[in-house]
Image (tube, rainbow, N blue to C red):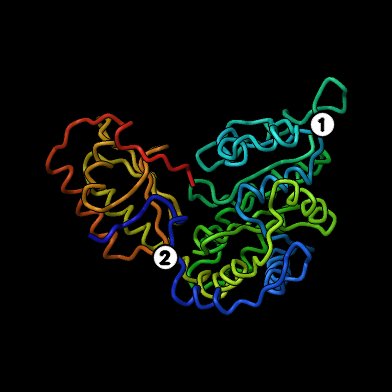
Amino acid sequence: MKIIDLRSDTVTRPTAAMREAIARAEVGDDVFGDDPTVLALQARVAELTGMEAALFMASGTQSNLCGLLAHCQRGDEYIVGQLAHTYRYEGGGAAVLGSIQPQPLTQDAQGRMALADIAAAIKPDDPHFARSKLLCLENTWNGQPMPHSYLAEATALARQHGLACHLDGARVFNAAAFDAGPGGDVFAALRRITAHFDSVSVCFSKGLGAPVGSILCGSRELIGRAHRIRKMVGGGLRQVGLLAAAANHALDHHVQRLHEDHALAEQLAEGLGGIPGLSVRSAATNIVFVDVADGRGAALLAHLKARGIWATGLIGLRFVTHLDVDSAGVERTLAAVREFFSADAGPHDLATAQSTAGPY
């Protein structure tokens, strides 16, 4: 039975063409700074994001951590959403490793912190308080692109108070594809988003389908500090051009096709929306959240898993489309969900079916 894995876009496997690109990669020793494929990728993504420099990282968590530690010192503070990945799902790294205090704020359904709350959270320059230094935003947020108007207003507010701005752009290419629209220039849309920020972390191993890697972009000075921090947290890699080649291939071949993932998510959301007992919280990009009536979400997950369809139930049922999912897989998923409700399955203990996978 072919598995339809809708748990996350992190589950993608390298395409045959990407594997060939990896095999052909010219490599050196990146710790010595002479891996040509890494250097080319860093220069390319810095230009794409409108930043001066970039630094390849093993993961998005490492990229965000190095960015936070490059912006802030011990006793500094970053303002962040209560449910943001950098605060909630990255092991508390900024606090544990950097002695940086997070100031979490409530978010709305699109991941936005109220501007008034941000302003109220910024501390005066007084020894009683941590020093407010950084605002962190996330785009996309649970599949929802943040409006440009909000990005502009929130970052302008931060800068009025002397704060820098960092973007957790794990799926920022999905946000850019949404902004560009089918047939639009995704790279130009990306630049419009990143223009609001002093630094941005971009992931290659989610919607872009590379096996490993993220990249931190910012000023030369900031990236210089991040380089030292990356070494301290074990991110000094050697012949990492093999992975950089996969990321370069993804930029060449997997960016414009993100519209296909968004269309599949829309197909899935429309189909689920017609099934009694389900309430669909559809995202605009490649993630669909679903609430199941009568507490039967875990039973539905178990039913799907028995039929080779994997999803998660950590924060509501979540289905993520990606380059390893096609229209036939979506229709098979819809058929299995309809079968579940037609059989009137009973309640099920959530703990028995909930995936241990995180929100990404």
Categorize mark 2 by other alpha carbons within 10 Å: few (<14), some (14-19), many (20+): many
Establish if 15 lies above or below 170: below
Q: Position of residue 312 (x, y in %)?
A: 37, 43
Left or right: 165 with respect to 172?
A: right
Answer with the quarter of the image where residue 314 lies: top left
Which residue is rendered at x = 73% and y = 43% of the image?
68
Establish if 126 lies above or below 237: above
Establish if 308 lies above or below 121: below
* Upstream in sequence: badge 2 or badge 1: 1
- As measured in the structure, the alpha-carbon distance from the residue carrying label 2 to the one carrying label 1 is 43 Å
Amino acid beneath label 1: Arg
Which residue is rendered at x = 33% and y = 65% of the image?
326
Q: Nearer the viewer, residue 141 or 148?
A: 141
Categorize mark 1 by other alpha carbons within 10 Å: few (<14), some (14-19), many (20+): many
Q: Which residue is mark 1?
A: 131
For the residue labelled by badge 1, is the local secondary structure a helix, a strand or a loop? strand
Answer with the quarter of the image where residue 291 lies: top left
Which residue is rendered at x = 42% and y = 65% of the image?
323
Q: Nearer the viewer, residue 84 or 115?
A: 84
Left or right: 198 with respect to 20?
A: right
Amino acid beneath label 2: Leu
Q: Position of residue 126 (x, y in %)?
A: 87, 24
Q: Position of residue 52 (x, y in %)?
A: 79, 63
Q: Nearer the viewer, residue 246 or 350?
A: 246
Q: Which residue is mark 2?
A: 323
Left or right: 21 with respect to 301?
A: right
Answer with the quarter of the image where residue 40 lies: bottom right
Left or right: 29 with respect to 208?
A: right
* Quadrant assignment for the N terminus: bottom left
Q: For the residues carrying marks 2 and 1, which lies nearer the camera in this image?
A: 2
